[in-house]
Image: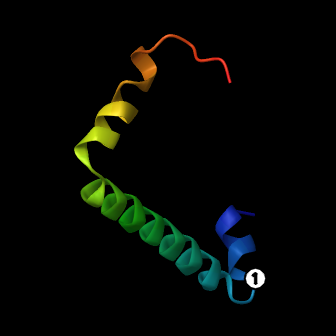
Amino acid sequence: MKFINYLEKILGVDVYALTSLLIFFLFFVGVALWVWKADKKTMQEISNIPLEESRHI
């Protein structure tokens, strides 16, 4: 039996696909807005994180 046959037997399985798509889309839009509105100094600090020496907390 193929995997798709198992999914067809679950009632409301399409809701899970739509919900996951909506969550991904909202997260993507949220991150895009954050990057667009963030100041350049913050973006410069974030972009230099991999190049810095290890920090001690």
Element under disc 1: loop
The residue under label 1 is 10
Residue name at image x 49 percent, y 72 percent? 21
Residue 9, given in percent of the width and then of the height, sits at 75, 82
Residue name at image x 44 percent, y 20 percent? 50
In the rendered view, tell whether residue 36 sits above or below residue 13.
Answer: above
In the rendered view, tell whether residue 6 sits above or below residue 28.
Answer: below
Identity, as a three-letter code, of the amino acid under mark 1: Ile
Task: Please tell me which residue lies in front, 44 or 22.
Answer: 44
Within 10 angstroms of label 1, few (less than 14), some, or many (20 or more) residues? few
Q: Is residue 56 left or right of residue 43?
A: right
Q: Quadrant of residue 20?
A: bottom right
Q: Is residue 11 left or right of residue 30?
A: right
In the rendered view, tell whether residue 47 sits above or below residue 30.
Answer: above
Q: Is residue 50 left or right of residue 32?
A: right
Residue name at image x 49 percent, y 65 percent? 24
Pick the quarter of the image with the C terminus.
top right
Q: Quadrant of residue 38?
A: bottom left
Q: Residue furthest top?
A: 53
Residue 10, given in percent of the width and then of the height, sits at 76, 82
Q: Residue furthest bottom?
A: 11
Pick the quarter of the image with the N terminus.
bottom right
Task: Please tell me which residue lies in front, 56 or 36.
Answer: 56
Task: Please tell me which residue lies in front, 28 or 51.
Answer: 51
